[in-house]
Amino acid sequence: MPRAEQTAKPPSFARIRGRIDDQTWRTIVARYVWWETPEEAATYPERVIARTMDMGDFDDIERVALLLGDATLRDVVAHAQAGWFDERSWHYWHYRLGLCDLGAVPPLPQRVLS
């Protein structure tokens, strides 16, 4: 059964894997989603990108930004799930990608328990 958070992805997420070469993908998955194989992680690439944006070193972040472009990174932030970003990264990406005005960063996504 697919994960619930996978149902509302924008179309750009389907193109993420096709824009990152296999070696870069394997490196990023090994560093930031170490509990899954690259093949398992490929079923949910936006989470891999978000983890890289949240925890990545400068080189990995710049490589992903160059390969995917700011529009895709904006989609990742706009559709982020709870726990994908810490507060510091959340603020950083909103400012870096021009998603908000100074002092107007939206709250982090939160899990809704029903």
Image: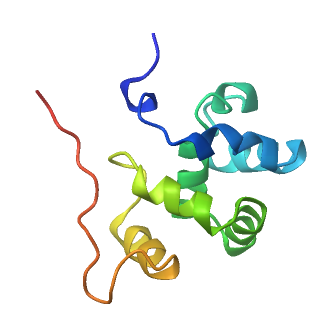
Residue 92 percent across, percent down from the top left? 45, 77
- Quadrant containing the C terminus is top left
5 displayed left or right of 103: right
Total residue callouts: 0
Q: Is residue 87 above or below residue 14?
A: below
Q: Quadrant of residue 102?
A: bottom left
- Residue placed farthest to the bottom in the image? 102
Colour setting = rainbow
User: In the image shown, does 30 or 48 lie closer to the viewer?
Assistant: 48
Residue 68 percent across, percent down from the top left? 71, 59
- Quadrant containing the N terminus is top left
Q: Is residue 23 above or below residue 44?
A: below
- Residue placed farthest to the front in the image? 11
Q: Is residue 60 above or below residue 40?
A: below
The residue positioned 51% from the left and 63% from the top of the image is: 74
- Residue placed farthest to the top in the image? 1
Q: Is residue 27 above or below residue 97?
A: above
Q: Quadrant of residue 34?
A: top right
114 displayed left or right of 66: left
Residue 9 percent across, percent down from the top left? 48, 38
Residue 107 percent across, percent down from the top left? 23, 65
The residue positioned 37% from the left and 25% from the top of the image is: 4
The residue positioned 72% from the left and 72% from the top of the image is: 62
